[in-house]
Image (tube, rainbow, N blue to C red):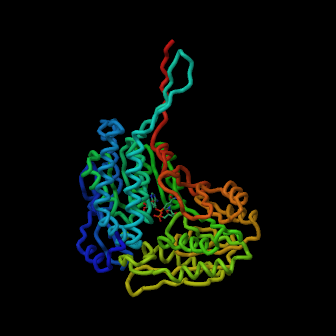
C-alpha cells in the first residue's frame, strides 16, 4: 500500500487528519477530571499535534469502575467465546479499513517511517486481534484423571480488570499484544499509552466501540507514568498489570503491587540482544545485512534490537565492512516520505540519551567507525545517524546498558564457548541470534543462550504463533501465541463429589 504513495499524498493526508485526544471511559470520550492536558508533539519537526487529556488518579478510578461494572454484569465476560470472536473480528476489520489513518497517526506521533507503520505495525495489530479472536472459541478446558467417585474440572476464567501500560516504540502493537488475548478471554481493560504516543490507541478504542465491544470493556486513560501509570499500578481493584517498558519502571510495578492488592504483574522489559556471527555462517553477507537491519530498524528503538554484534575474530573486518555498507545505503529522514527507512527518535530526551551513550562509548575507548551525530536539526526533528562501534569490550557501558537507538557495538570472540559466555554476560535475556552452518554448534548455542527467543541463521523472526518475552531482567510472562492467554486467566479447580 505504502509503495504506491508519494510524499506529497502522505503529507496532504496528514493535513486533513483529525485527532482524537480525550480519555475513553465507559464508552465515551471525556476530558480529564482535572481538565488538564499535555502537548502531544511530533518528533518529525518538534511541533505540537494536539493537546491530549492528562489522566490522573481520578480518571483511573472512573475507568476502573467502568471496567469492573462491565466485568461483573457479564456483558462481555460471560458472552460465549464465539460471540466475543465475532465482535473482535469486526474490530479487526475496522482497524484494517482505517489502516492508512492509523499508520499516519503512528508515524506523526512517534516518528517511525510511514512505510513501516503501514506495512508492519498496523497489519500486525490487525493480525493480532484476528488471531486471538479466531483462537478463543477453539480452546477447551481440562478434566482431571480422578477415580469414578469424582469429576474434577480445570477451567480457565478471565481475571477481571486488566490494566496495560505500554511504551512508545510500537505504540498500538504493544497494546494489541495485550488486548488480543485479554479481551478474547473476557476481561475488561484499561490501557495507558505512553505519553509520547497516545493517538492510535485513542482512535482504536473508538473503532472498538463501533465494532460492538460493550461500553466499559475497553477504556483508555492517556497521561503520564508517575500519575496515571502509578495510579493503575496501585489501584486496589485492578487485578492484573500487563506492562511493556523499561526495567526500571517494571520494577516499580512489582513494588506498587506489593504495596497494594498483590495484583498480578507481567513485565516485558528491555534487552541487549547478542547477535552472534560465527566464521562458518552459511552466508556472511546475509548475516551482516541482517545485523544492520537488526539494529537500525525502527531507529534502534526495539527491545530485541541486535545491539551487540558478536563476531568471530577472523571474519570481523569483513562483517563490519558489510554492516557499514548496508548502513550507508539507509535513507534516514522525513518519516512521512515512503522511501524513508529510518525516521526520527521519539523525542528530544531520547535523542539526547542516545547521543550521551555515543559519547560514553568513545570516552570508554570503543572505536566509532561511522555515524554518531544528530542530523537534520534544521527540521526541528530528532534524527541520529546510524552509528557503528568496533573494538567494544563487553563490560563497557554501551555493551551493558540498553541504548534504544541506532547504535551498534561490535565485540569479537575466538570460539563458540566464548561467544556464548559473552552473550549471556548481561542482566537481560530477551533474545539472541546465532549464525553458523554447524548444526551441533547451532543447537548447543540455542540451548545455552539464556533468552526468551533464539534465532538461528535469521534475526527477529517469529509470528503470532510464537511466544515473545524475556528471561532474567527482560521480564516474565509471554506475549503472542496461546500462552499469552495464561497471563489473563486464572486456573480454577472444580471438584464434584459423585460418591
Ligand atoms: P518506560 O519509560 O518504562 O515507559 C513505559 C510505560 O510506563 C509508559 O506508558 C510510561 O508512561 C509508564 N511509566 C513511566 N514511569 C512510570 C511510573 N513511575 N509508574 C508507572 N508507569 C510509569 O519505557 P519507554 O521509554 O516508554 O519504552 C522503552 C522501553 O520499553 C525499553 O526499555 C524497551 O526495551 C521496552 N520495550 C520492551 C518490549 C518487550 O516486549 N520486551 C517491547 C517494547 C519496548 P510515560 O510515557 O508517561 O513515561
Ligand atoms: Mg508524540
Which of 408 and 46 lies nearest the eye of the viewer?
A: 408
* Quarter that holds the N terminus: bottom left
> Considering only vertical position in the picture, is 129 above or below 286?
above
113 left or right of 266 in image: left
275 left or right of 184 in image: right
Quarter of image, res 107: bottom left
Q: Residue at x 35, y 76 (%)?
A: 336
Quarter of image, res 144: top right
Q: Residue at x 46, y 42 (%)?
A: 261
Residue that extends furthest to the bottom in the rendered view of this protein: 378
182 left or right of 253 in image: left
Residue 379 in the image, given as x and y percentages of width and height: 37, 84
Residue 25 in the image, given as x and y percentages of width and height: 28, 51
Residue 196 at least partly seen = no
Residue 418 in the image, given as x and y percentages of width and height: 75, 65
Q: How many marks?
A: 0
Q: Quadrant of ligand 2?
A: bottom left
Residue 220 in the image, given as x and y percentages of width and height: 33, 55
Residue 245 at least partly seen = yes
> Considering only vertical position in the picture, is 144 above or below 8?
above
> Considering only vertical position in the picture, is 437 above or below 7?
above
Amino acid at each position: 500500500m505504502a509503495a504506491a504513495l508519494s510524499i506529497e499524498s502522505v503529507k496532504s493526508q496528514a493535513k486533513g487528519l483529525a485527532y482524537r485526544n480525550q480519555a475513553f471511559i465507559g464508552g465515551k470520550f471525556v476530558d480529564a477530571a482535572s481538565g488538564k492536558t499535555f502537548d502531544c508533539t511530533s518528533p518529525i519537526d518538534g511541533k505540537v499535534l494536539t493537546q491530549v487529556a492528562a489522566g490522573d488518579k481520578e480518571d483511573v478510578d472512573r475507568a476502573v469502575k467502568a471496567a469492573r461494572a462491565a466485568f461483573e454484569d457479564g456483558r462481555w465476560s460471560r458472552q460465549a467465546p464465539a460471540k466475543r470472536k465475532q465482535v473482535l473480528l469486526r474490530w479487526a476489520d475496522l482497524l484494517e479499513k482505517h489502516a492508512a489513518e492509523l499508520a499516519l497517526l503512528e508515524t506523526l506521533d512517534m516518528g517511525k517511517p510511514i512505510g513501516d507503520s503501514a506495512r508492519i505495525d498496523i497489519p500486525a495489530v490487525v493480525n493480532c486481534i484476528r488471531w486471538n479472536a479466531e483462537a478463543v472459541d477453539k480452546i477447551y478446558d481440562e478434566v482431571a484423571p480422578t477415580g469414578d467417585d469424582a469429576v474434577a474440572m480445570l477451567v480457565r476464567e478471565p481475571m477481571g480488570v486488566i490494566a496495560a501500560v505500554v511504551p512508545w516504540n510500537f505504540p498500538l502493537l504493544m497494546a494489541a499484544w495485550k488486548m488480543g488475548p485479554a479481551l478474547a478471554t473476557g476481561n475488561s481493560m484499561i490501557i495507558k499509552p505512553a505519553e509520547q504516543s497516545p493517538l492510535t490507541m485513542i482512535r482504536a478504542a473508538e473503532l472498538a466501540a463501533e465494532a460492538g465491544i460493550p461500553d466499559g470493556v475497553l477504556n483508555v486513560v492517556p497521561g503520564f507514568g508517575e500519575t496515571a501509570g502509578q495510579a493503575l499500578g496501585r489501584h486496589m481493584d485492578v487485578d492484573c498489570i500487563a506492562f511493556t517498558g523499561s526495567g526500571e519502571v517494571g520494577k516499580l510495578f512489582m513494588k506498587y503491587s506489593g504495596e497494594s492488592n498483590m495484583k498480578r504483574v507481567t513485565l516485558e522489559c528491555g534487552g541487549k540482544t547478542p547477535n552472534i556471527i560465527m566464521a562458518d555462517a552459511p552466508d556472511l553477507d546475509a548475516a551482516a545485512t541482517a545485523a544492520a537491519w537488526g539494529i537500525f530498524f525502527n531507529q534502534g528503538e526495539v527491545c530485541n534490537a541486535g545491539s551487540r554484534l558478536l563476531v568471530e575474530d577472523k571474519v570481523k573486518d569483513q562483517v563490519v565492512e558489510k554492516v557499514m555498507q548496508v548502513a550507508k545505503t539507509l535513507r534516514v529522514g522525513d518519516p512521512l516520505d515512503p522511501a524513508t527507512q529510518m525516521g526520527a527518535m521519539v523525542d528530544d530526551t531520547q535523542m539526547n540519551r542516545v547521543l550521551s551513550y555515543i559519547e560514553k562509548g568513545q570516552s570508554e575507548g570503543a572505536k566509532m567507525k561511522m555515524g554518531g551525530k544528530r542530523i537534520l536539526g534544521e527540521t526541528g526533528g530528532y534524527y541520529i545517524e546510524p552509528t557503528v562501534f568496533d573494538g567494544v569490550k563487553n563490560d563497557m557501558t554501551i555493551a551493558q546498558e540498553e541504548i534504544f537507538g541506532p547504535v551498534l557495538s561490535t565485540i569479537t570472540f575466538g570460539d563458540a564457548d566464548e561467544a556464548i559466555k559473552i552473550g549471556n554476560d548481561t542482566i537481560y535475556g530477551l533474545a539472541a541470534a546465532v549464525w553458523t552452518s554447524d548444526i551441533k554448534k547451532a543447537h548447543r548455542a540455542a540451548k545455552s543462550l539464556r533468552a526468551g527467543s533464539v534465532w538461528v541463521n535469521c534475526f527477529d523472526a517469529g509470528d503470532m504463533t510464537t511466544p515473545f518475552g524475556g528471561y532474567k531482567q527482560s521480564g516474565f510472562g509471554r506475549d503472542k501465541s496461546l500462552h499469552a492467554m495464561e497471563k489473563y486467566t486464572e486456573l480454577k479447580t472444580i471438584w464434584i463429589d459423585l460418591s
